[in-house]
Image: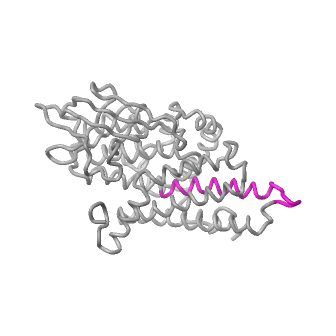
Amino acid sequence: MSVDPVDFLGIDRLLTNEERMIRDTARKFVRDRILPGIEKWFEAGEFPLEIAPEIGELGLLGMHLEGYGCAGTNATSYGLACLELEAGDSGFRSFVSVQGSLVMFPIHAYGSDEQKQQWLPRMAAGEAIGCFGLTEPDRGSDPANMRTTARRDGDDWILNGNKMWITNGSIADVAIVWAQTDEGVRGFLVPKGTKGFTTRDIHRKLSLRASVTSELIFDDARLPGDALLPGVQGMRGPLSCLTEARFGIIFGAMGAARACYECALEYSKTREQFGQPIGAFQLTQEKLVNMLLELNKGSLLALHLGRIKDEGLITPQHVSLGKLNNVREALAIAREARTILGANGITLEYPVIRHSNNLESVLTYEGTSEIHTLILGQAITGLPAFGGNA
């Protein structure tokens, strides 16, 4: 077997023909539709909403769900699509993760038949957009103590509170919002235009700029009784959604890492100093080798967790291990790649600083690195170290 300077271990051979086809389809879409415009969108702080139906047409929205116009692929294929999308930009993988794992998944798993019929086919086609309201301004890593409330008023619900750092917030046609009730934490479908529901975009971001990030504001927002997700109660609901989204990040982070590594590798062979390409210098080769090691190890880890998930054996702790390792290593690869590019590494002419900035957000959202460390710490010791137990 010949050595591939990117897929050094021949991980591609471990994929099925269908998985390769899905991976290649997503890769071509990124090459044809995302990369030509990403510098402009990132610099302008815009997400091109017109691309959403194209993503739906490819079958990438809710692709790991069955029925209702969803593709019904295996988890590994979903992960591979996330990897390719994030090789383009984290904003597009975030869009697909939020739509499929944080909004469509809870409707599919916990919604009524009417809710599924109303939203899932349109969301799978990219004709309707969703967002996921869990994080609050002062309750980022402690959602169980959220302040957003929903109280009964006859057959209706009255929703009050704020959600912060919400991807797709202002462009969403429906928000999945988690709130405290007399029955514990419950999920609600809040359509755009609901009286008392407003959004406010977060500007001046230096990360995830090609992604819409918003605050959701609920001021006596009145919802009908059938807005409630009937199939789940308590924190199990939102946490199960986070596990789905975190799984996609395990793969996605390796896409960003691959893009940075490929850029640095190519640059090292063409950029000359002292009369020779910088790739001929020992220190540059050490950087490239270190990047190669972590890229291939992280890709193997992602694939392994994908296979475990497809067997139905994956746990939230497995996902925490994958998310913690792969995002941390992807960020290290991006930073190392930037040093190879020197001053060119800080411009949008190359993808490295964009990926590096994006990964700073990925390191924090869907559970910070500290939270995933404590999840793993509890898993191996049996001793919780959160909050007052620290």
Residue 145, visible in the rendered structure: yes
Q: Observer-nearest residue: 2 or 227?
A: 227
Residue 18, visible in the rendered structure: no
Q: Position of residue 102 (x, y in %)?
A: 37, 46
Q: Position of residue 130 (x, y in %)?
A: 38, 37
Left or right of 283: which side holds 180?
left
- Examine the structure image and report whether residue 103 is included in the region drawn in magenta: no
On the image, which quarter does residue 335 sit in? bottom right
Above or below, 56 against 231 in this view is above
Image quadrant occupied by the C terminus: bottom left
Above or below, 64 against 151 in this view is below
Residue that protrudes farthest toward the bottom in the picture: 381
Q: Residue at x 40, y 37 (%)?
A: 123
Image quadrant occupied by the N terminus: bottom right
Question: Magenta residues?
Answer: 250-277
Q: Position of residue 90 (x, y in %)?
A: 53, 47
Q: Residue at x 34, y 70 (%)?
A: 379
Q: Residue at x 75, y 54 (%)?
A: 267
Q: Observer-nearest residue: 319 or 72?
A: 319
Residue that protrudes farthest toward the left in the picture: 154
Residue that protrudes farthest toward the right in the picture: 275
Q: Residue at x 21, y 29 (%)?
A: 222
Q: Position of residue 153 (x, y in %)?
A: 13, 32
Q: Observer-nearest residue: 47 or 111?
A: 47
How many numbered marks have been drawn onto this rendered protein structure?
A: 0
Above or below, 322 against 101 in this view is below
